[in-house]
């Protein structure tokens, strides 16, 4: 056991999990993904109330961003670690949020607990980083809870470490956990010791690690992740990657049907599979067999499955009409758009003749997909709003505005300022976080250093990026002893970021 806590059932509880925002959990994003896949959902309108339930919410940052950006939504977030819930409640009460409730409860038994009656029926439920890290008993409890609390037509997002993607790196996880437990005390130190040994073994060319691309890439990625993330990732008793068919089978008991992936590009099988692989996958009508073949070919290590309680299929016409009404915004200047996107089957290419005019138009300001498709001079191309939304949003080159033109609200402003004040330091500058935005009905992912810039940019009010004195800002931000060249380099970086994101920040009302 990692810790002495008996209530933890083998899950790490001696260190708090890292705060994070994951766009895949956003109700707008999940509804959009379902719509793209031709499944009828209620894409939240600007004034709609959404009841959102998050299971295993950690310190509740993602849920807090949603509550701040959407005062009309009701957010319920659950975790069994009292330290997580205490931190989450403190943040929400400092912000004066009245539309969020954090519950301390064990998901293994919550479905049978009187507390269940206090949880509103959910339009959207999400569990990120939970399913493959907890015991079968907790997973069974989650299924009973979803069965009891997801409304008919409600969406569920489940992320999990997947097989066969993790197959070649099973040794890595086992080694980190077992060696860590024998070499150190406390889950953070244990993960550190286990990872160090794994790195030594890779350097010594131990085949089971050195020959696994997943293991090598994972070790590289974990050099940059916070130590508490590594502890929660590796030191639990019950970590076990899952096959899609098993997860879909377990969730079927809650009347949940598989819809597709919250990673939008993953739903374009043509981009995942080579032509011969595609020909084999296309032979199967059974969705579980087809998904198994796709997973065997593309080998994702983390799946972001979307399920729905009761599938209603949309006609192509109805789907396209709904997609044409979606408003998109360009997150970067047009010259920084990538027309080639790396995918498992090679490269996906966005036709410049088709997408170029749309990108130029979006550079002037947000507009609907219908407006983009009606632009004059577009080459003859299938009129397919699904492809436009899927490719641009899926490659992170467009954002969906749930409330175009909505100004910032007080709660979002306070949350963003609080994040800067509490978490931005010289050593955390590059850490990912997210700013709450009512226009997005969620968070805008950005590095913590960008919070500082966005706030300074907002305070400078309405001027363009070229006229900002970033050297002065860099001097104020950098430590007093920083050499002049470092401060100048920082000022230049700040200028680049403002050019890259300044317009978007203005459109969102962030700056
Ligand atoms: C890897 S963390 C993910 C946190 C958050 N969803 C995120 O992605 O940032 C998993 C969370 O599940 C919680 N958890 C684990 N077992 C649980 C249980 N039996 N009941 C409730 N929460 C649990 C842990 O305390 C932890 O906060």
Image: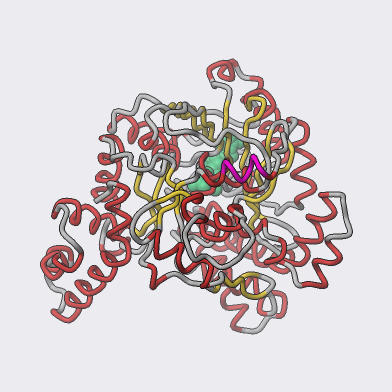
In which quadrant of this rendering is ligand 1 seen?
top right
From the top left corner, tell me how far across and down residue 71 is, in percent.
37, 29
The answer to whether 340 appears left or right of 301 in the picture is: left
- Residue 320 lies in magenta, yes or no? yes
Residue 134's place in the image compared with 295, above or below, is above
Pinpoint residue 104: horizontal percent, then vertical percent.
50, 29
Q: Quadrant of residue 484?
A: bottom left
What span is in magenta?
317-322
The secondary structure that most of the magenta stretch takes on is helix
Q: Nearer the viewer, residue 325 or 35?
A: 325
Q: Is residue 503 or residue 71 the one in the foreground?
A: 503
Between 488 and 278, the one lying in front of the other is 278
Q: Residue at x 24, y 51 (%)?
A: 511
Q: Residue furthest front?
A: 376
**Is 214 placed above or below 7 here?**
below
Q: Position of residue 7 (x, y in %)?
A: 58, 34
Residue 224 vertical position relative to residue 454 in the rendered view, above or below? below
Q: Which quadrant of the view contains residue 255?
A: top right
| Image quarter of residue 150 | top right
Q: Is residue 75 above or below residue 380?
A: above
- Residue that protrudes farthest toward the bottom in the picture: 204
């Amino acid at each position: 056991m990692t810790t002495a806590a008996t209530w933890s059932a083998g899950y790490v509880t001696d260190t708090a999990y890292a705060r994070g925002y994951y766009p895949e959990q956003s109700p707008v994003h999940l509804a959009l993904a379902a719509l793209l896949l031709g499944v009828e959902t209620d894409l939240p309108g600007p004034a709609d109330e959404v009841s959102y339930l998050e299971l295993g919410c950690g310190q509740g940052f993602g849920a807090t961003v949603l509550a701040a950006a959407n005062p009309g939504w009701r957010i319920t977030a659950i975790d069994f670690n009292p330290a997580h819930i205490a931190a989450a409640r403190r943040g929400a009460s400092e912000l004066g949020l009245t539309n969020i409730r954090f519950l301390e409860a064990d998901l293994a038994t919550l479905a049978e607990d009187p507390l269940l009656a206090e949880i509103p029926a959910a339009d959207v439920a999400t569990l990120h980083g939970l399913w493959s890290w907890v015991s079968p008993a907790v997973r069974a409890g989650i299924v009973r809870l979803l069965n009891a609390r997801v409304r008919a037509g409600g969406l569920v997002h489940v992320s999990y470490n997947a097989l066969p993607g993790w197959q070649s790196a099973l040794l890595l996880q086992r080694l980190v956990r077992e060696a860590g437990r024998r070499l150190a005390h406390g889950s953070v130190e244990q993960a550190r010791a286990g990872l160090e040994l794994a790195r030594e073994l890779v350097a010594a060319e131990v085949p089971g690690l050195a020959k696994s691309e997943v293991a090598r890439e994972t070790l590289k990625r974990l050099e940059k992740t916070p130590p508490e993330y590594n502890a929660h990732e590796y030191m639990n008793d019950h970590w076990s990657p899952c096959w899609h068919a098993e997860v879909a089978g377990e969730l079927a008991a809650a009347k949940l049907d598989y819809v597709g992936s919250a990673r939008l590009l993953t739903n374009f099988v043509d981009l995942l599979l080579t032509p011969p692989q595609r020909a084999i996958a296309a032979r199967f009508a059974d969705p579980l067999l087809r998904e198994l073949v796709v997973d065997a070919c593309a080998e994702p290590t983390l799946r972001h499955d979307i399920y729905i309680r009761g599938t209603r299929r949309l006609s192509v016409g109805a789907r396209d009409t709904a997609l044409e009404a979606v408003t998109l915004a360009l997150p970067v200047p047009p010259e920084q758009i990538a027309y080639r996107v790396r995918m498992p089957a090679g490269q996906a290419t966005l036709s410049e003749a088709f997408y170029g005019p749309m990108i130029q138009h979006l550079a002037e300001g947000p507009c609907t997909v219908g407006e983009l498709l009606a632009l004059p001079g577009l080459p003859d191309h299938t009129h397919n709003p699904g492809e436009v939304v899927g490719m641009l949003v899926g490659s992170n080159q467009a954002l969906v505005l749930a409330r175009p033109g909505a100004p910032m609200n007080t709660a979002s402003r306070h949350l963003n300022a609080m994040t800067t004040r509490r978490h931005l330091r010289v050593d955390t500058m590059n850490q990912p976080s997210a700013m709450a935005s009512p226009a997005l009905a969620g968070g805008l992912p950005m590095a913590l250093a960008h919070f500082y810039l966005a706030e300074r940019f907002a305070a400078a009010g309405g001027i363009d990026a070229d006229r900002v004195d970033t050297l002065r800002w860099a001097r104020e931000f950098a430590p007093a002893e920083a050499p002049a060249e470092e401060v100048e380099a920082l000022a230049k970086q700040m200028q680049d970021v403002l050019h890259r994101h300044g317009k978007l920040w203005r459109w969102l009302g962030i700056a």
